[in-house]
Amino acid sequence: MMENQNGNRELPQLLKTLKRIVNLTFYSFAFLVASSCNTASKSDKITIAFLDAFEDATITKAKQGFFVALKDSGFNPETNIEVIYRNAQGDIPVLAQSVDYFISQNVAMIATNTTLSTITAVQKTNSIPVCMIVSPSPELAGLRTKDGKDPINLFGVYETLEYIDTALFLVKAMFPNAKKIGTLINQSEPQSRDALERIQKQALAMGCEVISVPANNSAETQLAAESLINKGIDVFFALPDNTIFSSFETIVKSCDAAKIPILTSEAGLVSRGALAAFGADVYAWGYEAGLEAVYYLKTHKIRAPKKLLQRQRVYNPTKAKMYNIIPDSTFQILQ
């Protein structure tokens, strides 16, 4: 009689335990199903890589334009693409390591922001498509072969140096008495060397002298800028140079203290302290490159790199007031 009573008391408890086990099994199964769905969803995304050579307010605009173009065309990290991002912070070995990582992840495409990123990616792979942004033409970047062929995996948007001639004319237009034009140059960058050679020839025709000082990294910028000022320059001209981009605020501080105006061929530098520029719209550059990336992602076809279409004349009103300059109506205000 006692055994039956104990059995009757234990039965409800056993049923409750079984129910908990069933519920736990169900929820575990549901979690696994949901996880597998998420994994499948992630695997359905196209993985692309984006490589910045360094941290810089100007080239950041190009990155913004690139991803806006992708989003406008239906490619969004929230839905159908996964982006692996790296910033080398100006470190060449890190650039190489970043590209190696992209290759190991078998990305569908590498977007390269500025010349060093582009050169490194093309040197590391000829099978993964490379979309160039804020870079010179393949020829100027030293990527074209002796028989005139560009890398088979390279596409995107580049700029040539013709606009620098027009940009340099700003010196005489705004400062007719200027004789000495100063600039810094990263000697390891081919487009910087070509740009320097170009402005030297143009300045000579204008009756001016170009004084250049090497600065191969940001740590050398302040001393190089002070050296130029001590050489008695009248105007600083900012070339399309990655060292200038990455440490421009240091240059501005030195030049402002010495009352030396900064003119440039890079429109994005005006909002960072240059007086005026005739040059590339960097955001538009990124956007145009993004459209080239969209074409590849949709068709899996690589189009030859194309030349940047949009340029602009811009000025900084604060600096214009400092130097008593009134730009004509062809200039836009950029603050």
Image (cartoon, rainbow, N blue to C red):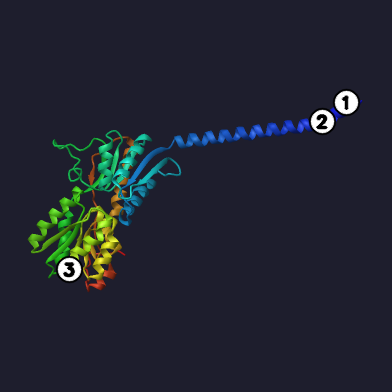
* Real-space CA distance between mark 2 and mark 1, rounded to the nearest whole angstrom: 11 Å
Q: Residue at x 45, y 42 (%)?
A: 79
Which residue is under mark 3? 174
Quadrant position of residue 274: bottom left
Residue nearest the observer in this picture, 89 or 197: 89
State the residue position of label 2: 10
Q: Residue at x 46, y 37 (%)?
A: 42
| Residue 199: % across, % down | 14, 57
Q: Amino acid at mark 1?
A: Glu
Taking the image as shown, residue 297 lies to the left or right of residue 264, namely right
Which of 83 and 220 lies nearest the eye of the viewer? 220
Q: Amino acid at mark 2?
A: Glu
Secondary structure state at the residue bearing disc 2:
helix
Q: Is residue 36 above or below residue 210?
A: above
On the rendered image, what quadrant is the C terminus found in? bottom left
Image x and y of residue 200, in percent: 11, 57
